[in-house]
Image (tube, rainbow, N blue to C red):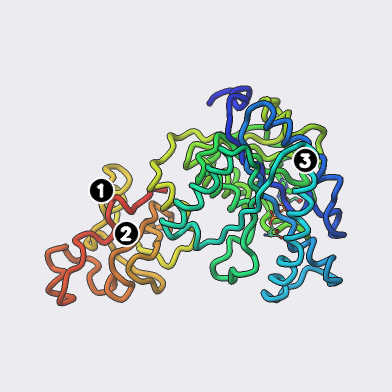
Amino acid sequence: MTKRAEIAAGKRWVVKVGSALLTDDGRGLDQKMISTLVEQLARLRARGCEVVLVSSGAVAAGVVRLGMSARPHLLHELQAAAAAGQSVLVQAYENAFAAHNLISAQVLLGHDDIIARDRYLNARGTLNTLLGLGVVPVVNENDTVVTDEIRFGDNDTLGALVANLIDADALLLLTDQQGLYREDPRQNPDAELVQSSEVNAPELDAMAGEGGALGRGGMVTKLRAARVAARSGSETVIAGGRVDDVIARVTAGENIGTWLRTGKQPQNARKQWLASMVQIRGSLELDDGAVRVLRDSGRSLLAVGVRGVHGEFQRGDMVSCRDSEGREVARGLVNYSAAETRRIMGSASSEIEGILGYVGDEELVHRDNLVIA
Ligand SMILES: Nc1ncnc2c1ncn2[C@@H]1O[C@H](COP(=O)(O)OP(=O)(O)O)[C@@H](O)[C@H]1O
Ligand SMILES: N[C@@H](CCC(=O)OP(=O)(O)O)C(=O)O
């Protein structure tokens, strides 16, 4: 896609609405904002587009409902707030969509639903079926059961994974700023808006800062999310949720907000699933030859090309493969534990049996289980 106007051809949208936008400066849900957004989503549906809404706001709504003075830090208090707030949030959406004769459906997802392939396929099937039935799925993280270790934590990431799941044409991240600026506008009110950029452009990393008091990830997680969404070929636009008619204008291809262009060809479904695993258990330091083999020829990673092992992981965990300067080259599911890998690194595959007393797989990471960064 080379021109912004081509976005208008997108028929499948994921629209993500952040806490910063929805929660009336932390005083509970901003019902007016919900009605405004839903009215715009209803128009998008009437134009024949399918849409999945990813909405934050459960914790913020729960904090007010339970009379807490601020967003809690303890995990169980956060989870209690999310549980009490999610029902209010979903009810607000139900009412707002019903006013436009649309049915919405609550979908709560956790990290486990993404890393287990059967659950991933199941979630995809359910979302596609809901869309086929004309329903608007309203997705949030299943906050009440996730633990710190396995939570997405921010809904930008969740929005991107949903875009991967349903092969969305585009992801729209709506927030309290009008897009990505060259500097955080809270620090520099004169910062310039980035209108468009290739999503993987390295200079974007230095521009994106942390979030405000209400949201979680700021532009850091929005940028990361755009890169995840791009893996399935989804374009991303970050725009201001309070801008008049923002959803209609972005989806019509108007040049507002920040467009992060995909640039690359989408990965196949299995590689997308692999890429969507956000929990990395350890890393492998590769020698230059292995880096070249992975980057240029798409072959498997063998133990002989590994010089160092960091972290503790088990067979089947996701590990990051890095060059000698620590830059990520690829990620993949490893066939040996960290302890085993430490023993076989630098050795030829034919030597594994002699070292370990058994041989599982010839490859340390098979090419089918490897995604290049
Ligand atoms: N370069 C930047 N451009 C725009 N906003 C930025 C930038 N860096 C950091 N931010 C901050 O990110 C915040 C939006 O993210 P966040 O608070 O997580 O909201 P949300 O709940 O919508 O996800 C903005 O309020 C802004 O202060
Ligand atoms: N699942 C949480 C949302 C996490 C969060 O705050 O995300 P975001 O505002 O999008 O950065 C909730 O509903 O409160």
Write the residue at 75% across / 69% down: 81
> Element under label 1?
loop
Q: Is residue 245 above or below residue 6?
A: below
Q: Which residue occupies the foreground of this view, 249 or 127?
A: 127
> Element under label 3?
helix
The image quadrant that residue 360 belongs to is bottom left
- Which numbered mark, 3 or 2, is in the foreground of this view? 3
Residues at circles 3 and 1 in contact by the CB criterion of under 8 Å: no
- Which numbered mark, 2 or 1, is in the foreground of this view? 1
Residue type, numbered disc 1: Arg
Q: Is residue 328 above or below residue 52?
A: below
Q: Label 2: how many residues lie within 10 Å, few (<14), some (14-19) or many (20+)?
A: many
Q: Is residue 297 above or below residue 121?
A: above
Q: Is residue 364 visible?
A: yes
Residue beneath disc 3: 37
Cα separation between marks 2 and 1:
14 Å
* Residue 133 x %, y %: 59, 39
> First in sequence: mark 3 or mark 1?
3
Residue beneath disc 1: 299
* Residue 220 x %, y %: 63, 52
